[in-house]
Image (cartoon, rainbow, N blue to C red):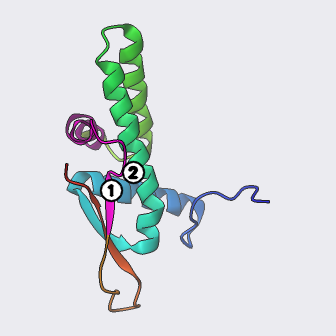
């Protein structure tokens, strides 16, 4: 049984792991791509996809003229704000990134494999947002 098993541990305590994910996600959305180890990229990839989907749903709900739609959009912004550093990144996701993928059903990120890192031969990848 898999009670209490969730996500990737990445060899870190919980608070460091949460901070690492927050930093990686913020950098991914800020720059469009990041170079990191394969394990870290795979740990962050799913969460990045979910955040874009949340933003898309928030935008779609915000287009409605009723108060319920505006409330759903505000809720989506709060969800992202709690997992990312700063309002600037959340604004960028809602204004630039989510509209870019409005017609796309999923698969917003891509992993490109690189040569192993020189110091410890760790598998390195580029995690990037797919250009539409």
Is residue 118 on the magenta stretch?
Answer: no
Quarter of the view holding residue 38: bottom left
Q: Would you place residue 101 above or below residue 122 in this image?
A: above
Q: Nearer the viewer, mark 1 or mark 2?
A: 1
Rendered image: mark on residue 71: none
* Mark closer to the chain start, 1 or 2: 2
Quarter of the view holding residue 92: top left
* Camera-nearest residue between 56 and 30: 56
Q: Which residues are magenta?
A: 89-111
Label 2: element kind: helix
**Which residue ends up furthest to the right in the rendered image?**
1
User: Pointer 1: residues within 10 angstroms few (<14), some, or many (20+)?
Assistant: some
- Residue of label 2: 48
Q: Are marks 1 and 2 in contact (CB under 8 Å)?
A: yes
Q: Position of residue 71 (x, y in %)?
A: 41, 17
Rendered image: mark on residue 109: 1
Q: Position of residue 16 (x, y in %)?
A: 51, 63
Residue drawn where x is 36% and y is 92% of the image? 119
Label 1: element kind: strand
Residue drawn where x is 44% and y is 40% of the image? 82
User: Pointer 2: residues within 10 angstroms few (<14), some, or many (20+)?
Assistant: many
Q: Would you place residue 42 above or below residue 28 in this image?
A: below
**Which residue ends up furthest to the top in the rendered image?**
66
Give left or right: position of 17 versus 125. Answer: right
Q: Would you place residue 127 above or below residue 88 in this image?
A: below
Report the quarter where the N terminus lies.
Answer: bottom right
């Amino acid at each position: 049984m898999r009670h209490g098993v969730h996500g990737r541990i990445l060899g870190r305590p919980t608070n460091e792991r949460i901070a690492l994910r927050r930093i990686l996600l913020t950098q991914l959305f800020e720059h469009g791509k990041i170079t990191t180890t394969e394990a870290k990229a795979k740990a962050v990839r799913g969460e990045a996809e979910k955040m874009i989907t949340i933003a898309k749903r928030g935008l779609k709900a915000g287009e409605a003229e009723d108060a319920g739609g505006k409330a759903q959009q505000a809720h989506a912004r709060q969800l992202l704000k709690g997992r990312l550093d700063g309002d600037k990144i959340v604004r960028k996701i809602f204004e630039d990134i989510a509209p870019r993928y409005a017609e796309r059903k999923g698969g917003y990120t891509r992993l490109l494999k690189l040569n192993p890192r020189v110091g410890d031969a760790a598998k390195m990848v580029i995690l990037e947002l797919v250009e539409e």
